[in-house]
Image (tube, rainbow, N blue to C red):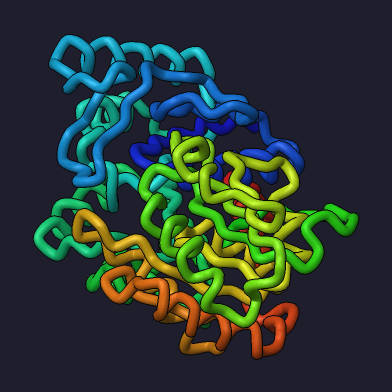
Amino acid sequence: MRVFFYVQHLLGIGHLKRAATLAKALRAAGFEVTLASGGMPVEGIPVLQLAPARTDSSFKHLLDESGKPVDEAWKARRRDALLQAFQDTSPEVLLLELFPFGRRQMRFELLPLLESVHQETLVVSSVRDLLQPKPAREAEALERFERYFDRLLVHADPRVARLDLTFSNTKALAGKLHYTGYVVEESDARGNAGEGEVLVSAGGGAVGRRLLETAIQARPLTSLRDRTWRILTGSNSQDSDRLGFHSDEKLIVERVRNDFTLRLKNCVLSISQAGYNTVLETLQARARAVLVPFAGGAESEQTLRARLLADRGLVQVVEEEELTAATLAAAVDRAAAGARPAAATIDLGGARRSAELLREWLK
């Protein structure tokens, strides 16, 4: 059973990382998966790499690998490469990450791709728990979904976050919408690395500099000032050297670590943004956590996710517009004084369940 899985990450690497976790689960379930990525290459994630595209924090400009705006010739080349890769694969399933509920700027290649699909191919949209609300474009998204798609996978636990929080007309999706649970790669990491540390991370690191700097400033104001603080700037960040002058024997600044999930499991406290993957890894590790959701470029997805989890008593939250050393230090102390989140509070089996659903639908 062959799956062609398209994903486009533009700013961070969260979309690609979630897609890679899904692809791994599909392969474990017996599927042959081609994961086609249109974002910047990320080391350690095997993909069929399309000509890379990215954006700035406004999400308004599509840029090529060198940072120049893409032109019509570039779009035509990438469209043709995508169509050829899809035809060469001849899959039973076409899985599109986020489209048509997002990634509208990629319609120059996705609409021709959808038009090329044979009637017997199962076409599925894969979306995270929360969308970026755009009421003016809901009708367009619904029209395209009804025209091209057979099913919608929503990678969320509906007890925590339902799609209708960010998409008003979910009734029109009745019968095609399926919640899978949250998608997070299962971790069996063992050891005591990072035990007792405060772990500060910025995901891919493209937009996390202010959080990292504020955490360093907040450190001496907290009850955890004598602990080791480990600052992870992210694979997309160039901030390691610029932040490094703050380092001392108990303040360590690094770019990335391969044992991040183990250190989450062992840390006394995690400070991070509220991206999908980081939040789910934090909950899986049952770590005490302070979330500072990214809210730039009119983004609201991380803020809503953080508030939903705070309402369930699973995290402490500092809104980005309220972020200071003092407000972050106060949140750190509140989180440190609380208990670790209980196990099995939300459904984290979304990767495995997605594979099960695809298998059922193909039958």
Q: Nearer the viewer, residue 148 or 319?
A: 319
Q: Position of residue 227 (x, y in %)?
A: 71, 68
Q: Nearer the viewer, residue 170 or 272?
A: 272
Q: Quadrant of residue 332?
A: bottom right
Report whether 347 appears left or right of 29.
left
Q: Position of residue 250 (x, y in %)?
A: 69, 58
Determine the residue positioned at 64% across, 50% down: 252
Picture layout, residue 7 above or below residue 340? above
Q: Nearer the viewer, residue 155 or 233?
A: 233
Determine the residue positioned at 55% across, 55% down: 201
Residue 285 in sight in this render = no
Q: How many numbered dots are placed on residues in this image?
A: 0
Q: Quadrant of residue 362?
A: top right
Q: Position of residue 215 (x, y in %)?
A: 49, 64
Q: Position of residue 36 (x, y in %)?
A: 48, 27
Picture layout, residue 28 above or below residue 32? below
Picture layout, residue 282 above or below residue 109? below
Q: Quadrant of residue 280?
A: bottom right
